[in-house]
Amino acid sequence: MRIVLVGPPGAGKGTQAAFLAKNLSIPHISTGDLFRANISRQTELGKLAKSYMDAGNLVPDEVTIAMAKDRMEQQDAQGGFLLDGFPRNVSQAEALDDMLEAEGMKLDAVLDLEVPEDEVVKRIAGRRVCRNDSSHVFHVSYKTPKQEGVCDVCGGELYQRDDDSEETVRKRLEVYHTQTEPIIDYYKAQGLVVTISALGKVEEVTGRAMEALQQKV
Ligand code: AP5
Ligand code: ZN
């Protein structure tokens, strides 16, 4: 399956993607995680991305699309993928359509996670991620690590993401409403969107998501 996951910052996209990708045996491709991996390796791409991410803005399309394309072309993504955080505006969605069309492929579903803004703020404020791999995600009250400040998966140090400050989160939400939400209508026109509530326990949301995706295959 080829799936796009959309939802506001802190909706639980990364958390759900980890379970869905495992259940569906497809790779989880997060452009946010790819940028953060570049930042920790101090690559040129990482340096460029960091300045935009810390301000809560989108990284320019040109570099984002090239990075996403490169990842989707890897062997493990040939049979399908779960995209998390890409596309994030209509021009990225058009670029993705062009990329897939050139290969004779298309998307199967766009899963839209709906969460009220006050819940998003709570989820982001308590989020802690692993220094070794930002896809290892915890929460100070909703998903506490066994040992405080230590990643259960790899033993790495947990920290608060630089872009999780209150001011940057406000900016990220504004960018979501103005630039990312329009892709939902773009995909609705293609009949691809399934919307679910992302409230409740993580496993409840996963169950809802799996059910919704089954309607699309
Ligand atoms: P990115 O990393 O994609 O951030 P985001 O979209 O803002 O999403 P988040 O990672 O904040 O949240 P999430 O929905 O994954 O939630 P999570 O599962 O962690 O992007 C960061 C930046 O990179 C962007 O601002 C931009 O600058 C750049 N970028 C990335 N892609 C780009 C693109 N395509 N184009 C241009 N720029 C791009 O969950 C949040 C917390 O809630 C966690 O602590 C978790 O444990 C907890 N939680 C999850 N589910 C539940 C639940 N059901 N109940 C209680 N707690 C829960
Ligand atoms: Zn870890």
Image (spheres, rainbow, N blue to C red):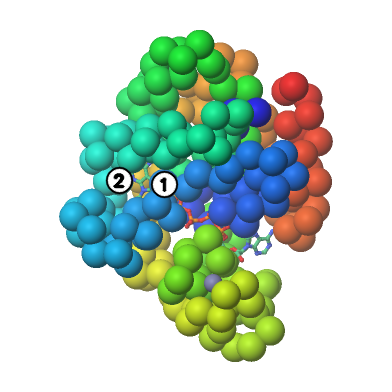
Residue 132: image x %, image y %?
Answer: 45, 71
In the rendered image, is residue 79 in sight? yes
In the displayed structure, 191 sits above or below 93; it is above
Between disc 1 and disc 2, the foreground one is 1
Using the image, determine if residue 125 lies above or below residue 90: below
Which corner quadrant holds the C terminus? Answer: top right
Q: Earlier in the sequence, mark 1 or mark 2?
A: 1
Q: Which is nearer the eye, 56 or 50? A: 50
Whether residue 51 is visible here, answered yes or no, is no
Residue labelled 1 has its Cβ within 8 Å of some atom of ligand 1: yes
Residue positioned 61% across, 29% down in the render: 79
When asked about the image quadrant of residue 89, the answer is top left
> Residue at the spot x=37%, y=60% of the render?
37
Q: Could you say where residue 178 lies in the image, as x and y percent from the top left?
A: 37, 38
Residue 58, labelled with which disc?
2
Q: Do the CB atoms of the residues marked 1 and 2 lie less than 8 Å apart?
A: no
For disc 2, does the CB lie below 8 Å from ligand 1?
A: yes
Q: Residue at x 80, y 46 (%)?
A: 207
Mark 1 Cα shell of 10 Å, populated few (<14), some (14-19), many (≥20): many
CA gap, disc 1 to disc 2? 11 Å
